[in-house]
Image: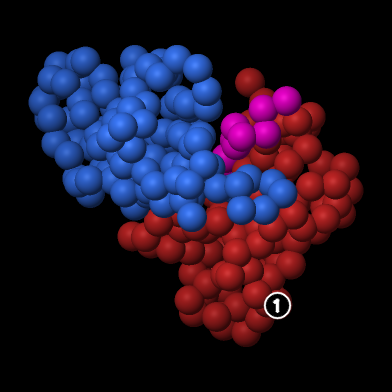
Chain colours: A red, B blue
């Protein structure tokens, strides 16, 4: 069964460094998302992406964040200058055109900012 | 605006007992509702969803949930718990604030199953 994949599974970085989290959505899906889950807290929406554009972003998704679909398969989340409070599990999700409401999640990337 | 409340951050049941995980929602439009499960060190897996139609929806692993508009609830049940059901369960509602919906999650309920 097709699934969303994410790399790396874990990332440790120093405060102020740039990180890029990578996702490969399910191949025929058209809608893409990033969510994050700070330890012990809710899963929170960051951004949605369709047709090479951001559809919607939350208040969390400030100028330090960006997303890109650099080729036909990858979907990336970049944090330009990481802060301690960016430490979280980051989930990528994708959904198909026919059932846009059904989002399939990847296993997540655990980011630790020191 | 949409929101989700899950009652009980931890629920413990014995193997073979009924599982009941509670979820209440708030939505200004007819809601799309979801339950996801997260096993340790894994991502979120869709258990079941309600969009329209039949209010009792069946999902994977023997779980089901009933949409009750009058109670604004979408509780998750399973008649007989199995050890493998131990995980964290998240209720979510679709937020259509923008052109592309996104999910608003509850805080999650951690289910423990005792032998």
Q: Is residue A102 magenta?
A: yes
Q: Please name the residue shown 69% across and 46% down the image.
A: B100
At 49% across and 79% down in the image, what residue appears? A84
Q: Is residue A22 left or right of residue B54?
A: right
- At 40% from the left edge and 19% from the top edge, which residue is drawn? B55
**Residue B67 inside the magenta-drawn segment:** no
Magenta stretch, main secondary structure class: loop
Range covered by the magenta-colored residues: A98-106
In the image, residue A108 above or below residue B64 = below
Q: Which secondary structure, mark 1?
A: loop
Extreme residue toward the right, this view: A71
Tell me the crowding category of disc 1: few under 14, some 14 to 19, or many 20 or more residues within 10 angstroms, Cα based. Answer: few
Q: Quadrant of the N terminus of chain A?
A: top right
Using the image, determine if residue A77 lies above or below residue B41. below
Residue B61 visible, this angle: no
Q: Which residue is mark 1?
A: A63
Where does the image place residue B92, in percent across and percent down from the top left? 44, 42
Report the front residue among B67 and A53: B67
């Amino acid at each position: 069964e097709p699934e969303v994949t994410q790399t790396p599974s874990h990332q440790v970085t120093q405060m102020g460094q740039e990180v890029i989290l990578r996702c490969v959505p399910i191949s025929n899906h058209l809608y893409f998302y990033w969510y994050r889950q700070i330890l012990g807290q809710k899963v929170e929406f960051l951004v949605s992406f369709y047709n090479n554009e951001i559809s919607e972003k939350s208040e969390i998704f400030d100028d330090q964040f960006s997303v890109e679909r650099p080729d036909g398969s990858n979907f990336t989340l970049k944090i330009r200058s990481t802060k301690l409070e960016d430490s979280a599990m980051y989930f990528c999700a994708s959904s198909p055109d026919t059932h846009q409401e059904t989002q399939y999640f990847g296993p997540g990337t655990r980011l630790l900012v020191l | 605006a949409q929101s989700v409340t899950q009652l009980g951050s931890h629920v413990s049941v014995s193997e073979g007992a009924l599982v009941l995980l509670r979820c209440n929602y708030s939505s200004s439009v007819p809601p799309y509702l979801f339950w996801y499960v997260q096993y340790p060190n894994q991502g979120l897996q869709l258990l079941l969803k309600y969009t329209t139609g039949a209010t009792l929806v069946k999902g994977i692993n023997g779980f089901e949930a009933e949409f009750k508009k009058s109670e604004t609830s979408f509780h998750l049940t399973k008649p007989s718990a199995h050890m493998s059901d131990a995980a964290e369960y998240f209720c979510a509602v679709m937020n259509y604030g923008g052109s592309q919906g996104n999910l608003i999650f509850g805080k999650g309920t951690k289910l423990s199953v005792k032998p």
